[in-house]
Image: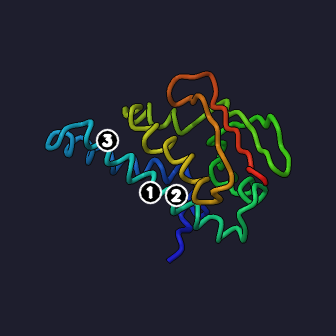
Amino acid sequence: MPDRLNEAIGVLTRREVEARLVAPLVEALATEFGRDKVLRVIREAVVKIARRQGAELALAKGGESLSKFRESLVHWTRGKALEVEVVEEGENVFAFNVTRCRYAEMYRDLGIPRLGPILSCSRDFALIEGFNPGIRLTRTQTLMEGAPFCDFRYRLEVG
């Protein structure tokens, strides 16, 4: 069955629901198996899920071009979840800065700021890899980890 949850409720609401379930599980599992081990396993699972969701997104969008990917950002920015400043946009490049991230704010408000990068930011590279392995993401900093902005740089490798 296709995953249409992002379209129905938006990604910010989805991440909050997931976080409210995952956070207590992480605590319980960390007590039993150790925090570092549990966080590593969760990160690996989240990356695997994101890669699969990227491939599903390309199918749903009817293509894996950078412009098709750009169209999908509406789900992540819904309800002003992200405030974005486009730096460069073209056929083979899409670069933007996120100047406000309500995802980071939500994780802080829930008292789980250390889970935010694992549950949200760690998805970004795997998602685009699943969407189109020829598109490379470069990102050197995130608001989630205390930087003044997130620097997303997508580039389609041609040739």
Direction front: furthest residue: 159
In the rendered image, residue 159, in percent from the top left (x then y), is placed at 79, 54
x 33%, y 51%: residue: 21
Label 1 Cα crowd, 10 Å radius (few <14 / some 14-19 / many 20+) = some
Point out the tag, 1 or 3, that comes first from the N-terminus: 3
Q: For the residues marked 1 and 3, what is the alpha-carbon distance in whole angstroms? A: 14 Å
Q: What residue is shown with label 3?
A: 39
In the rendered image, residue 117, in percent from the top left (x then y), is placed at 46, 37
Q: What residue is shown with label 1?
A: 48
Tell whether label 3 touches label 1 (CB within 8 Å).
no
In the image, is 117 to the left or to the right of 133? left
In the image, is 125 to the left or to the right of 22? right
In the image, is 159 to the left or to the right of 42? right
Tell whether label 1 touches label 2 (CB within 8 Å).
yes
Quick check: 4 above or below 27?
A: below
Q: Amino acid at mark 2?
A: Arg
x 76%, y 34%: residue: 85
Q: Amino acid at mark 1?
A: Lys
